[in-house]
Image (cartoon, helix red, strand yellow):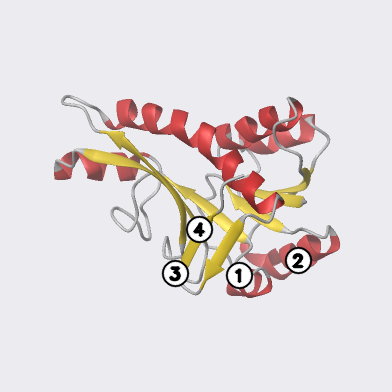
Amino acid sequence: MNCAFFVSGRGSNFEAVLKRMKNGELQIKIPLVVSSSETAMAAETAKSENIEVFYANKENQQKILDVLLAKKIELIVLAGYVKKIPDGIISAFKNKIINIHPSLLPAFGGKGMFGEFVHKAVIERGVKISGLTIHLVDEKYDNGAILFQKAVAVKNGDTPSDLAKRILIEEHDSLWRVIKAFSQNRVIIDENRAAIVDE
């Protein structure tokens, strides 16, 4: 299965997937990485792995779709990508775009809710359980059908950074498993609901 990763920052989830590929646990190909930043560490990681990098900006949105189609991409993985995906790409890849979000959606999602902004809001609200959600992407922020969730306790005295670190460990262990399910046709999608069938 050909996967494209969309990145914006350091790309630790992308690196975690690469690790699973290298040890044989995940058998996919990544012919393309799309980066919203020319200084993203994830883009440099991709280059070091001889993966083509496309830098996205407001002027070349249609070109992104052309490149995705040319590369015969079957699944798009948003791994820390902070830009909204153009509707044309969402339409062309319906139910084939997934995002990993650092809270238990639908709580603490939506525009502007990414990275430590999420963890700060969780702690300020006094929530006792947070976690991560992997979901399908549609035209609204953090709105698509939920594929997978993992709970992580919020501890007394947690800073946003503390909580982020614990959730990130679970993200690294979860994203590759959902991608693997797609590669093995173990994902069932029924309108606004989705499920993963066990191996």
Label 2 crowd bin: few (<14), some (14–19), many (20+), radius 10 Å: few
Which disc, if any, is residue 63?
Answer: 2
Q: Secondary structure at mark 1?
A: helix
Residue 154 locus on image (x, y percent): 23, 32
Q: Secondary structure at mark 3?
A: loop
Q: CA distance from mark 3 to mark 1?
A: 10 Å
Q: CA distance from mark 2 to mark 1?
A: 14 Å
Residue at 68 percent across and 38 percent down: it is 43
Which badge, 4 or 2, is on the more N-terminal residue? Answer: 2
Which badge, 3 or 4, is on the more N-terminal residue? Answer: 3
Q: Secondary structure at mark 2?
A: helix
Q: CA distance from mark 3 to mark 4?
A: 20 Å
Residue 181 locus on image (x, y percent): 63, 49
Q: Secondary structure at mark 4?
A: strand
Q: Which residue is mark 1?
A: 90
Q: Nearest the camera: 18 or 80?
A: 18
Q: Nearest the camera: 71 or 29?
A: 29
- Contact (CB < 8 A) between labels 2 and 1? no
Which disc, if any, is residue 195?
Answer: 4
Q: CA distance from mark 4 to mark 2?
A: 32 Å
Which disc, if any, is residue 140?
Answer: 3
Residue at 44 percent across and 69 percent down: it is 140
- Contact (CB < 8 A) between labels 4 and 1? no
The reply to whether residue 7 is visible in this rendering is: no
Which badge, 3 or 2, is on the more N-terminal residue? Answer: 2
| Mark 4 or mark 1, whichever is nearer to me | 4
